[in-house]
Image (cartoon, rainbow, N blue to C red):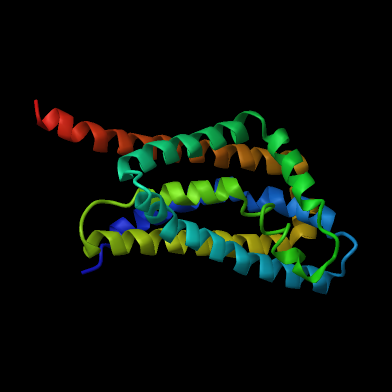
């Protein structure tokens, strides 16, 4: 019997963190500006390609990132603690100084010149899913529960579904960038970004706590 509760919990945890760091709503406002000279049909194609590239990058980091680091001798507990701190630090930056993050993203997306490969670079990497998103995804993958396939499979199903949901949100937000710009505006988008960043801060704290518990459990049991 699949652990649906574990899958749902993993989905909620991963979706809140990935949505916060990718920030499809805020990114869509920048996307609208840097693609203003393109036709609506061209932007729809770009949005679809960016969504596909984004889910591939996030799934790769979620599935393989923590295993690659473990191969080089980094323990799962260390991965969780370091990954959680990275997530929390990024969230704190988004919460306290979103303007700095927005300016950096604007600069990254500004390299778009209308080439056919713009969908991947720079509009997917690093603008939509850059190093910050990849590090968050690796941290989430490292937060996998102990146990056999009965617990690990629901976990990876949940976080994979979250990555897919975020990529679909990116596709929809970028496809509707003009409407979002008129509906939300910069101020409302920043409010949503701060709310999402607070959720991400909570997620990072929880991942760090899980890693600390992994380290302390055998020490406490030995006493």
Which residue is drawn at the image coordinates 43% and 46% (left, top)?
139
Which residue is drawn at the image coordinates 37% and 61% (left, top)?
156
User: Residue reaching furthest front?
Assistant: 72
- The answer to whether 220 appears left or right of 169 in the picture is left
Q: Total of numbered circles in the picture?
A: 0
Q: Indicate the quadrant where residue 193 lies.
A: top right
**Which quadrant of the figure contains the C terminus?**
top left
Along the viewing direction, whichever of 54 and 14 lies nearer the viewer: 54
In the image, residue 208 sits, relative to residue 115, either above or below, namely: above
Along the viewing direction, whichever of 116 and 195 lies nearer the viewer: 116
User: Residue reaching furthest top?
Assistant: 223
Along the viewing direction, whichever of 201 and 125 lies nearer the viewer: 125
Which residue is drawn at the image coordinates 83% and 60% (left, top)?
35
Report if residue 23 is visible in the image.
yes
Q: Position of residue 101 (x, y in %)?
A: 69, 38
- The answer to whether 102 appears left or right of 84 in the picture is right
Which residue is drawn at the image coordinates 48% and 57% (left, top)?
61
- The answer to whether 45 appears left or right of 23 in the picture is right
- The answer to whether 116 appears left or right of 195 in the picture is right
Q: Position of residue 77 (x, y in %)?
A: 31, 40
Report if residue 13 is visible in the image.
no
In the image, residue 5 sits, relative to residue 87, either above or below, namely: below
């Amino acid at each position: 019997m699949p652990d649906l509760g574990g899958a749902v919990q993993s989905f909620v945890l991963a979706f809140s963190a990935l949505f916060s760091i990718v920030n499809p709503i805020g990114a869509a406002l920048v996307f609208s500006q840097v693609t203003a000279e393109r036709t609506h049909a061209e932007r729809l194609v770009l949005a679809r390609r960016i969504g596909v590239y984004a889910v591939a990058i996030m799934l790769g980091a979620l599935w393989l990132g923590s295993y690659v680091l473990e191969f080089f001798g980094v323990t799962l507990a260390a991965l969780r603690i370091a990954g959680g701190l990275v997530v929390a630090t990024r969230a704190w930056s988004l919460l306290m100084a979103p303007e700095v993050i927005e300016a950096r993203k604007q600069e990254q997306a500004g390299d778009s010149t209308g080439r056919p490969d713009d969908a991947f670079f720079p509009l997917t990497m690093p603008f939509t899913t850059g190093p910050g998103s990849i590090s968050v995804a690796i941290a989430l993958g490292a937060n996998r529960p102990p146990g056999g396939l009965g617990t690990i499979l629901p976990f990876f199903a949940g976080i994979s579904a979250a990555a897919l949901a975020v990529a679909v949100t990116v596709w929809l937000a970028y496809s509707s960038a003009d409407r979002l710009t008129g509906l939300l505006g910069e101020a409302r988008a920043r409010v949503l970004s701060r709310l999402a960043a607070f959720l991400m801060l909570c997620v990072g704290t929880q991942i760090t706590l899980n890693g600390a518990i992994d380290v302390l459990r055998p020490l406490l049991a030995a006493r």
